[in-house]
Image: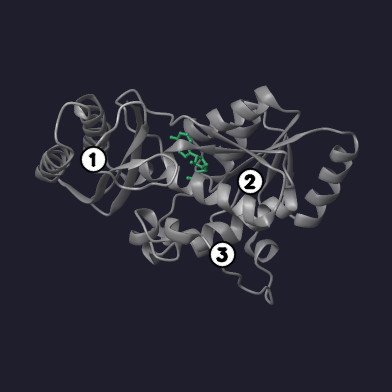
Amino acid sequence: MILFKKAGDLNIHLQKLRSQNLKIGFVPTMGALHGGHVSLIERSKSEIDITVCSIYVNPLQFNNKKDFETYPLKPEADILLLEHTGCDILFHPTENQIYPDQDPMRSFDLGRLEQIFEGKFRPGHFQGVCLIVEKLLGLVKPNQLYLGQKDYQQTLVIKKLVQLMGMDIGVTVCPTFREESGLAMSSRNLRLNVAERELASELYKSLMKISKELFSRDIEALKDEAIARLESIGFKVEYLEIATTDGLQAVQKIEPKYSYIILIAAFLGSVRLIDNLMVTG
Ligand code: AMP
């Protein structure tokens, strides 16, 4: 694996690869890598010539300063894991490589995606995501981008960004990689203690229960029950909704043959967890 810290060096190397007609797959991350990230890299490796991973904890996408300050970092372990996975290139820039002083702040028209769910509860988050992803896409110019379903709304935002940028980049959304308990892998899980980590798998269990009963029971009752149960064992639920998979419109009624997504965000102590499950009628 080749490690680049400078955007210019990465650019020169990628240009060479592109001139050899090699296709590039890209997996942007914020590090503290786990099985979910590895599954994206493996998918890219299985489909495309060169796999580039980036690690950069983007301060602009954190609406909560404490969350940024406590975001786990483990660069040495990340590098070992990436080498072991067979990643070809790691871009691990410093902040001044990404946001040089005079860089103008841009704003992106994300429509209602920015006002609902993660957009509503994390003001400014998706603008920050778009700023970094636009930079990285402009630099890496990948043929294919690999994202995780775990951050489903983010996949819709990034698809929209790719459209706005007018770049010819395919987007592959990979399934959520879970621990044996069902807990969706996340860098933030590192901030849970042993008891919390065990409890955290209840989020997935709630999603599973809703998915099984979605077509036979009243949606509001199902949501209320799940929220009450989760709150009784220590979660603070921010939202739990059933929405259409394309436009993330919350629904009160399920139609057969359509796809829906059950979305949840909840705090366990100071750690905010999100998860989702897709269901087809
Ligand atoms: P992050 O480092 O959290 O910004 O995530 C980088 C990429 O990995 C994003 O596309 C995430 O959706 C994806 N990702 C994070 N956790 C998982 C998971 N458990 N399964 C699959 N993809 C994931």
* Among the two numbered marks 1 and 3 on one chain, the one whose residue lies closer to the N terminus: 3
In the image, what residue type sits under mark 2? Ser
Mark 1–mark 3 distance (CA, rounded to whole Å)? 37 Å
Q: Nearer the viewer, residue 222 or 144?
A: 222
Mark 2–mark 1 distance (CA, rounded to whole Å)? 29 Å
Question: Within 10 angstroms of label 2, few (less than 14), some, or many (20 or more) residues?
Answer: many
In the image, what residue type sits under mark 1? Glu
> Closer to the observer: label 1 or label 3?
3
**Residue 79 % position (x, y):** 62, 38
Tell me what residue is drawn at x 27 percent, y 45 percent: 241
For this view, does 266 lie left or right of residue 98? left
Question: Within 10 angstroms of label 3, few (less than 14), some, or many (20 or more) residues?
Answer: some
Q: Nearer the viewer, residue 281 or 270?
A: 281
Q: Secondary structure at mark 3?
A: loop
Q: Which residue is mark 2?
A: 54
Q: Which residue is mark 3?
A: 108
Q: Which residue is mark 1?
A: 196
Q: Is residue 212 above or below residue 171?
A: above
For this view, does 10 lie left or right of residue 155? right
What colouring method underlies this structural image? one colour
In the image, what residue type sits under mark 3? Phe
**Residue 26 % position (x, y):** 66, 40
